[in-house]
Image (cartoon, helix red, strand yellow):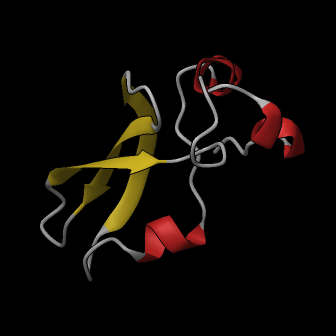
Amino acid sequence: MPNLPTEAAEMTIKQVAAHLNGMFPTDDSLLDALPAGRTFVSAKHSAKSAWTITGKLTARNADEAEELYFVKERAVPQGKPS
């Protein structure tokens, strides 16, 4: 899973998205937010947004069926132009 560089605070959303190369940054707090009994499968960049990075998380439930979750993450300080 990709991590954002320490310089991300100085990058625009477009630069951050390019750095991630189609992936979506994840950390333990995001994975812990999945409903109980779900297993993380993958995270990918899913759409364009002016102020956030939008991602699609795939998880499996107890029946092994895939479930999709859509999330937004702000990668730069609020109010920084992109």
Q: What is the residue that sits farthest to the right in this orientation? A: 6
Residue 51 vs residue 41, the one in the foreground = 51
x and y, in percent, of residue 42 in the image = 43, 44
Q: How many marks?
A: 0
Q: In x, y percent, where is residue 55?
A: 39, 39
> Does 40 sit above or below residue 80?
below
Q: Is residue 57 above or below residue 80?
A: below
1 over 37 or under it: above or below: above
Q: Quadrant of residue 33?
A: bottom left
Q: Residue at x 61, y 27 (%)?
A: 81
Residue 14 vertical placement versus 70 (above, below): above
> Depth check: 70 or 49 in front?
49
Location of residue 79 in the rendering, given as x and y in whole percent from the top left corner:
57, 42
Quarter of the image with the C terminus is top right
Query: Between 76 and 21, which is closer to the camera in this rendering?
Result: 76
Q: Is residue 78 left or right of residue 72?
A: right
**Which residue is drawn at the image coordinates 32% and 71% (left, top)?**
34
Give how far across and how far down residue 60 sits, in percent: 25, 59
Residue under the image location 38 percent in, 27 percent down? 49
Specify whether 74 is left or right of 41.
right
Q: Is residue 26 left or right of residue 44?
A: right
Quadrant containing the N terminus is top right
